Each structure stands twice: as structure tokens, then as C-alpha cells.
Image (cartoon, rainbow, N blue to C red):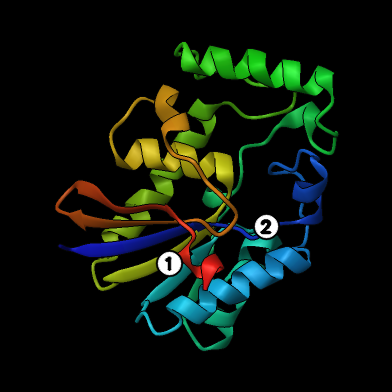
Amino acid sequence: MDKEIYIIRHGETELNKQGIIQGRGIDSDLNATGRAQAAAFYKLYKDVPFDKVYTSVLKRTQQTVQQFIDAGLPWEKHTELDELAWGEFEGQHTSELVIGAFKDITEKWQAGDYEAHFAGGESPADVEIRLKEIVAVIKSRTAEKLILICMHGRSLRLLMCLLMNKPLSEMYDFPHQNTGLYRLDLTGDTFTVLTQNNTDHLNV
């Protein structure tokens, strides 16, 4: 094993709770539940000897791993880890209209149309391009043997497809709860999933 990677989705925000679309363009804070989820994750994993913490540039990811940062772990934020931009639907409640639009576009994605996107937003193909860039950076840093990444639900699904060499249409094979943990090892160019969407820390 050359590297071990922990990947978590950020904690709950008030917009998550209210069913409002966030995406890359909305920089929301964790709510009380999200802060408790983050604290629970830290409590269980604080003794894991991470070499580096990576987050998106959106503050909900930084807030989720803030205790690791405060404990002195090196930290970098990268736009490549941001959530997919939902364009015209960001900030909207999940009404019947919005649910229908999401159903239509996700059906296109599952049919292999990875360029499909909402007006002003990104497609899975767009996100894949930037995810490939950050994966190349992380793989190149051979001295970092154990890292923690905090990112977002949709981009996490797409990252897992990329790491597991699966088509993006299989993104729904990778569920994600707030602070759910994916743990992988990297040997050569091969990633292996050791843990999928683990939330044991929320049950302690």
C-alpha cells in the first residue's frame, strides 16, 4: 500500500435540512447537527496519524474538519474538490418542478450523457476534469501516506467513479450521508475501497 485515503462528505447545513439546493455557488455554514457530526467524527478519528487534510474552498468542508486543523494538521483547500455547480437551481427548494428537472438530468447522466447540465451549472464531465487534476496532485505527493479529504456529495460520487475506474453513470453506487466515510488504499495506480459511507462515529 502506497497511500491510505479517508474521504468524508461535509456535515449537515441548514440548507440540507430545509431541502434547498446548494452546489458550488452557495457557501453555507454547518448547522448545530453538522457541528455535532463533525465533533463526533473528530472524536473517533483524532488519533489517526493523518499527514494532510484537504478540503474544497467552501467553508462547510473546512468547518467539518476544523478540529483536525486546529490540532495542527497541515491543510490545503482546492477548488477542484468543490461541489458540482447546479446553476439556475442553486438556492431553490426541492419543489415538484425541481425534483422533475433533477430526475430528467440524472436520467441523462445514467444513460451516458455526461455533458448534460443545468443552465449556468456544471456537467459531470466538467467536474471529472477538475477531479482528475487534484487526484494527480495527491498521487504525486508520495511523502503523504495517510490523508483526509472533506468534500461534497455529488462530487464525492463522481470522485469514487474516477478512483474505481467506473463510468460516471454508476455514481449512484456510492451513497453519502453527512460525514459518511469512505476509506481507500492506493497501491500503484489501483484504489481499493476498504470502507463505504461508514457512519459509526454517529452511533458512539
> Front-most of 48 and 117?
48
Q: Image check: 187 left or right of 29?
A: left
> Front-most of 52 and 45?
45
Query: What amino acid is found at the position of numbered circle 2 in the picture?
Result: Leu
Q: Earlier in the sequence, mark 2 or mark 1?
A: 2
SS class of the residue under badge 1? strand
**Location of mark 1 (residue):** 148
Instruction: Say above or below: 156 vs 40.
Output: above
Residue 77 in percent (x, y) is at: 56, 63
Q: Image check: 115 left or right of 131?
A: right
Check if mark 2's residue and mark 1's residue have beta carbons within 8 Å. no
Report which quarter residue 179 is drawn in: bottom right
Residue occupying image coordinates x 50% and y 88%: 72
Q: Image check: 176 left or right of 160?
A: right
SS class of the residue under badge 2? loop
**Location of mark 2 (residue):** 58
Instruction: Say above or below: 72 vs 191.
Output: below
Query: What amino acid is found at the position of numbered circle 1 in the picture?
Result: Leu
